[in-house]
Amino acid sequence: MPPTDYHNSMVTKKQTMATTYASVTSPTDQKLAQLSELEKMKKGGFWFRPWRLDDVANLSWIIGIHVLAAFAPFVFDLGALVVALGLALLTGLGMTLGYHRLLTHRSFKISKWIEYMFVYFGALAGQKDPISWVSTHKSHHKYSETERDPHSPNEGFWFSHLGWFCYNDYVIAKCGEYSNHVPELRSQWFYRFLHDTYYLHPIAMGVVLHIYGGFPYVVWGLGIRAVVVCHMTFVVRSVGHIWGERTWNTFDTSTNNWWTGVLALGEGWHNNHHAFPNSARHGLEWWQFDLTWEVIKFLELTGLAKDVKLPTEAEKRRLLSLGLVQTDDKTI
């Protein structure tokens, strides 16, 4: 949960992969040296390696929300359920609309106060601060399914689903420091503030829920809600590269999966997204339900969103001319 501390991290600000191998003059040698270091970290395994504070906190967060969720059948409360559903929708949209389609891909434009509102909802989802998350996702698209993909499906279901979330040194070794990829966020006080104080916000929400409704509200509004929203997002990285249909023959194994499309508020149409990453709409067919897109459409209709990006017919024809489209859906 807390932001990565570059001074205490194994891969510090002065020890990223670029500077570690600066003395290697040949680009080929640099790449081989980097891959060698990554192989050492990979062979070291997930559990038996030096554990940094941020990794311990992230793992503790994941364990904690699941433990809380286990109490749900014993403290059921209708009011707590309603609060959990409302928070799940808000924090889910904070991730899909705020973190992903707005901050990462700039699929549309909205005023700063609305941007900050959605992003803050995303921070309450418990999936890292905007600087860390956006940087990681940009690297995923840039290095998709290569050695430098921060949550490559080639490293197994467990790693792509959750392992990467608790191994910051490995992600930094692959992709470099988080802030290097998002200078536009690092330059804004709000995102620096969330990066430096991130862990306080989910804790504060738990305190507020307890004051408002006691332990049942913490269990449902924090535990159950966070488990659902976290896995809702995580399945896109794991399931979204394993099971589903491929409408677009992209250079990766991304798929469109109907149930993740529904549960992840439209993010599960992942093959569409990898084909057109800057599109504000992921469910490109009328039957591909995309709740996040419906919210963006509403914002556009009310004049709150503008410059909404969608794939054009020319872009689709361009993919076709490059041989990146397959005409028949193929289940894999």
Image (tube, rainbow, N blue to C red):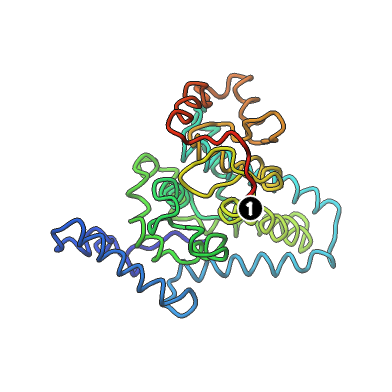
Up the image or down, 332 lies above or below 283; here it is below
User: Badge 1 local density, few (<14 within 10 Å), some, or many (20+)?
Assistant: some
Q: Is mark 1 on a helix, strand or loop?
A: loop
In the image, taking residue 43 as reference, residue 273 lies left or right, namely: right
Q: In this view, does 286 lie above or below 277?
A: above
Measured along the vertical axis of the image, is residue 54 above or below residue 313? below
Question: Taking the image as drawn, is residue 87 in sight?
Answer: no
Relative depth, front residue between 276 and 92: 276
Q: Find residue 292 and report its horizontal and vertical position in percent.
A: 64, 36
Residue shown at 55%/55% (left/top)? 127
Q: Which residue lies at the image location 48% right of the left edge and 73% below the top edge?
A: 46
94 with respect to 278 (left or right) = right
Q: Which residue is drawn at 46% across and 33% down?
A: 106
Q: Position of residue 132 (x, y in %)?
A: 44, 52
The image position of residue 274, as x and y in percent, is 51, 41
Q: Which of 185 and 166 is in front in this view?
A: 166
Q: Is residue 330 left or right of residue 41?
A: right
Vertical side of 305 occupied by 23: above or below: below
Q: In which quarter of the image is residue 184?
A: top left
Task: Judge from the rendering whether residue 77 lies leftward or rightward of residue 288; answer left or right.
Answer: right
Query: Could you tell me the amino acid type at mark 1?
Result: Trp
Q: Can residue 263 be seen in this view?
A: yes
The mark total stands at 1
Q: Name the residue under label 1.
A: 243
Residue 17: x %, y % from top left: 27, 61
Q: Which residue is drawn at 20% across and 63% down?
A: 21
